Image: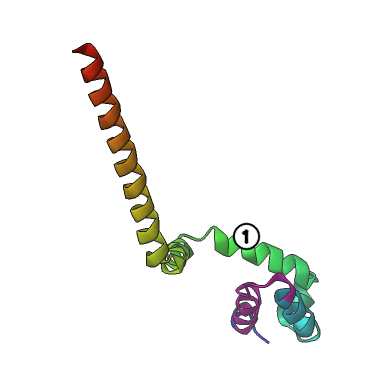
């Protein structure tokens, strides 16, 4: 297994959203990893490689845009619209209460 194949496999593992699934995939890959040239040269445990790889790719600017887009894609427009509707209703109610209070003060003044 060369470094390109190793990178692809490790990236596949770290992209797993479920921590326990990620650990399970890593454990299943451990035996194959130990046959790679990278392991033979460095003797780095797979767990350490996974941690370092996550940090390395988290700091890469090319992935920053992808992560931002993934967050944006996860937003629910229905929830956002509902929130704006609730805020509009709240401000409308408060404006009515303020107007009523101003009317009361105006009547008291007269």
Query: Does residue 99 show up?
Result: yes
The quarter of the image holding the C terminus is top left
30 sits left or right of 101 in the view? right
Nearest the viewer among 77 and 16 is 77
The quadrant holding residue 45 is bottom right
**Tally of numbered tags:** 1
Give the main secondary structure of the magenta stretch. helix
The quadrant holding residue 58 is bottom right
Taking the spot 48% from the left edge, 64% from the top edge, the residue there is 67
Task: Judge whether 70 appears above or below 91 on screen.
Answer: below
Task: Judge whether 59 appears above or below 78 on screen.
Answer: above
Taking the spot 71% from the left edge, 70% from the top edge, the residue there is 19
Taking the spot 67% from the left edge, 73% from the top edge, the residue there is 18
What's the coloring here? rainbow
Nearest the viewer among 77 and 36 is 77
Which residue, as the protein is rendered here, is positioned at the far left?
110
Estimate the x, y position of residue 72 in percent, counting from the top left.
41, 64
Which residue, as the protein is rendered here, is positioned at the far top?
109
Estimate the x, y position of residue 39 in percent, counting from the top left.
76, 76
The quarter of the image holding the N terminus is bottom right
Estimate the x, y position of residue 83 in percent, counting from the top left.
40, 55
Task: Judge whether 102 appears above or below 30 on screen.
Answer: above
65 sits left or right of 29 in the view? left
**Label 1: how many Cα within 10 Å (few below 14, some 14–19, many 20+):** few
| Residues drawn in magenta | 5-20
Asked if the stretch drawn in magenta spans residue 9, the answer is yes
Taking the spot 34% from the left edge, 55% from the top edge, the residue there is 85
Estimate the x, y position of residue 21 in percent, counting from the top left.
71, 77
Mark 1 lies on residue: 55
| Secondary structure state at the residue bearing disc 1 | helix
């Amino acid at each position: 297994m060369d470094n390109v194949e190793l990178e692809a496999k490790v990236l596949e593992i770290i992209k797993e959203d479920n921590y326990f699934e990620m650990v399970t995939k890593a454990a299943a890959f451990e035996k194959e990893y130990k046959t790679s040239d990278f392991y033979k040269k460095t003797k780095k445990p797979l767990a350490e490689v996974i941690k370092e790889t996550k940090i390395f790719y988290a700091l890469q600017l090319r992935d920053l845009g992808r992560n931002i887009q993934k967050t944006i894609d996860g937003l629910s427009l229905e929830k956002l619209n509902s929130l704006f509707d609730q805020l509009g209703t709240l401000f409308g109610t408060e404006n009515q209460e303020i107007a009523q209070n101003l009317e009361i003060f105006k009547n008291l003044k007269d």
